[in-house]
Amino acid sequence: MLNWSTTNLTQYNHEAFTFDEEVDVKKELMERNPDIITMGKVRAQGSILYSRGDFTVNGQVSASVTLPSTRSLTPVEVPVHFEFTETYLTRADHADQYEDDDLLILLKDDRLDLMPAVKDNVLLGLPLRVLTPAEEAATELPHGDNWALISEEEAAPLPPEERADNPFAGLQGLFDENNADGDKK
């Protein structure tokens, strides 16, 4: 399950090894993120290319995860789909062959295991804002007696409240760079 011997993968020298598997990571991901209500199997597909003594993985992952709505806590099925590229190094001194922004992972043994990458990327791909279709379609945000939910756009222009009787008001401007007396004690 997304775990191969590097010896076997080297036989595909300069020819991509392709994979397409479904894995069940529900238990592990629900333990790591308690917001996950349920999820289906994760489909991982892609290719592994052995070149320059290292393995470059180009993968696509898709899953369906049920999360609570961030507004009403109603369960919402959220599709997750992402692509990733990672290079697995067989030796640490190979790192200087790659660009600084390449994701490089040093192999600890003779196995290339993509399960940690798949699990981590599914969790990283979960949206922070989850709404039901009805909540997304609503033109008016929820409100009640003496309260109302406002959007970030509505909140941005609100000026910060300043108190006239601020005890620190006398210190304002004391450390300004333009203050000629700033260096004197």
Image (tube, rainbow, N blue to C red):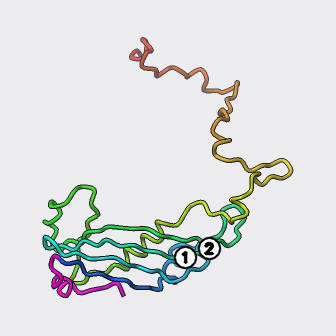
Residue 64: which numbered mark, if any? Answer: 1
Residue 14 picture location, percent across and down:
16, 76
Report the amino acid beneath label 2.
Answer: Glu
Report the amino acid beneath label 1.
Answer: Ser
Q: Is residue 2 magenta?
A: yes
Q: Secondary structure at mark 1?
A: strand
Q: Nearer the viewer, residue 91 or 60?
A: 60
Q: Is residue 9 magenta?
A: yes
149 up-or-down from 78: above or below: above
Magenta part of the protein: which range? 1-14
Q: Quadrant of residue 92?
A: bottom left
Q: Residue at x 20, y 71 (%)?
A: 89
**Residue that badge 2 annotates:** 77
108 up-or-down from 128: above or below: below
* Side (left or right) of 131 relative to 147: left
Residue 105 picture location, percent across and down:
26, 69
Q: Residue at x 84, y 47 (%)?
A: 146
Earlier in the chain: of badge 2 and badge 1, it is 1
Contact (CB < 8 A) between labels 2 and 1? Answer: yes
Q: Quadrant of residue 113?
A: bottom left
Residue 7: which numbered mark, if any? Answer: none
